[in-house]
Image (cartoon, rainbow, N blue to C red):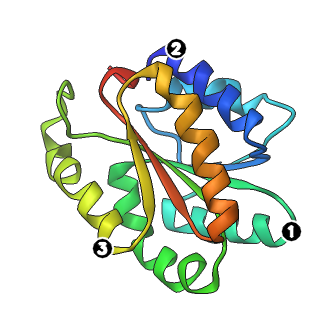
Amino acid sequence: MKPEAAKQTLDALIDAGIDFAACLPDSAFKELYEPLSSESKIDYVQVANEGDGVGICMGAWLGGKKPVLIMENTGFGVTTYALMRGPIPFGIPMLLLIAHRGGFHDQRWFSVPFGWGTEPLLDAMRISYESVTKTEDIRTAVTGAVKSMNSIQAPVGVILGGGTLF
């Protein structure tokens, strides 16, 4: 992730009232994890896999927190069962912050199928989302997504790709 995009993302999470973050650290969001882990306004938890992160974010929300689950789209594939068994049917809001690996400008060839499948999978699960490719659009997308997740009481996604990552 570009350093300026990481700063914009962290600032947007704080401004939107996110106060709990779960993640399985990855290379796409490395520049975000380091400042996030020392941010006093957000409880930061590393998880063993992204599916566990869904359950941990559910518990955080039930405990009064506003959670974000941060992951690459490869990890998003791991969350589908947990999302369909928990937050989607029971109306538990959480922000899914997803790095779009496998798209243009990405040199990791093994991520390409995940790049093709991320948006169709979100659509199939009826998860509202916005794709962001410009750093200057991050704040609006994140704050809008948090407003939506609180309003509809469901998971929502922000996909960061293109110029935000590479």
Q: Position of residue 24 (x, y in %)?
A: 53, 48
> Compared to 5, does 21 lie above or below?
below
Report how far apart the C-alphas of labels 2 and 3 lie in the structure: 32 Å
> In the displayed structure, does residue 80 sit left or right of residue 143?
left
Which residue is depicted at the point 59% across and 62% down?
53
Q: Position of residue 15 (x, y in %)?
A: 76, 34
Secondary element at tag 3: helix
Secondary element at tag 1: loop
Dividing the image into 4 quarters, which one contains the C terminus?
top left
> In the displayed structure, does residue 10 sit left or right of residue 77?
right
Q: Position of residue 122 (x, y in %)?
A: 35, 64
Which residue is depicted at the point 80% across and 40% down?
42
Label 2 environment density (alpha carbons within 10 Å; few <14, some 14–19, many ≥20): some
The residue indicated by pointer 3 is: 124
Identify the mark nearer the N-term, 1 or 3: 1
- The reply to whether dot 1 and dot 2 touch (C-beta < 8 Å) is no
Q: Nearer the viewer, mark 2 or mark 3?
A: 3
The residue indicated by pointer 2 is: 3
**Furthest-top residue in view?**
4
The residue indicated by pointer 1 is: 63
Which residue is depicted at the point 49% across and 19% down?
136
